[in-house]
Image (tube, helix red, strand yellow):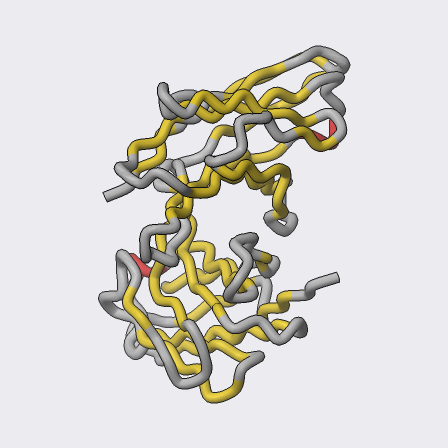
Amino acid sequence: DVKVTQSSRYLVKRTGEKVFLECVQDMDHENMFWYRQDPGLGLRLIYFSYDVKMKEKGDIPEGYSVSREKKERFSLILESASTNQTSMYLCASRRASYNEQFFGPGTRLTVL
Amino acid sequence: AQTVTQSQPEMSVQEAETVTLSCTYDTSESNYYLFWYKQPPSRQMILVIRQEAYKQQNATENRFSVNFQKAAKSFSLKISDSQLGDTAMYFCAFIGQGGSEKLVFGKGTKLTVNP
């Protein structure tokens, strides 16, 4: 079975802190994604990566950056956390030639 | 741009009954995939069912089936013999084959199965 793991289930940070959210997949998938999920808004794509060292902006990249130095790991970085970044963050991966995405358990981030 | 609309923010059903969740989408592409994902409370999102647009036959997975109406751009999910474990958020999603690699999600329907 494909496994996508995220470094934390719950995270509390202060405004202005630098925040790292880590995602690891174990199935050698080329594509990886970061979404944020908010009530009534569904899932919104922040960034995605087709392969190592490649990244593309999604629909809401402002305030975020990403890093993909290894194929299995995709990191989401909040350079200076703000209260409006309080949300559930979901990571996903898929093999390039298939379209099913596999999701991690999510990180619920609270910025105080 | 593709859009996915789920018009029912919340639904409820009695255990063992059948419920249908609605989804419509907008696209100019001729070939694409449609998905239903399930997100149980505090648990991981998982794929329920997938439909390829060029296949006329509706996809089925055990108690889950879809009614895919390509001309109407409609993709509803039917859950038969509802179980308490079906309580979840359900998301309809679309991905085109015209170059975009991004999955487009609806806003979700919260389904509650009552005992």
Residue B3 seen in this snapshot: yes
- Which residue is found at the position 32% from the left and 51% from the top? B98
Q: In which quarter of the image is the N terminus of chain B?
A: top left
Horizontal arrangement in the rendering, residue A56 relative to residue A29 (left or right): left
Q: Is residue A69 shown above or below B6?
A: below
Residue B115 seen in this snapshot: no
Please tell me how many numbered marks the rendered image carries: 0
- Which residue is found at the position 45% from the left and 21% from the top? B69
Horizontal arrangement in the rendering, residue A5 relative to residue A79 (left or right): right
Instruction: Using the rendered view, name the quadrant where residue A51 is placed.
Output: bottom left
Horizontal arrangement in the rendering, residue B69 relative to residue B59 (left or right): left
Q: In which quarter of the image is the C terminus of chain B?
A: top right
A107 or A73: which is nearer to us?
A: A73
Q: Where is residue A75 in the image (x, y as percent from the top left)?
A: 46, 77
- Which residue is found at the position 42% from the left and 42% from the top? B32
Q: Is residue B69 shown above or below A18?
A: above
Q: Position of residue A84 (x, y in %)?
A: 29, 57
Q: Where is residue B109 in the image (x, y as percent from the top left)?
A: 48, 29
A83 or A98: which is nearer to us?
A: A98
A102 or A22: which is nearer to us?
A: A102
- Which residue is found at the position 37% from the left and 77% from the top? A66
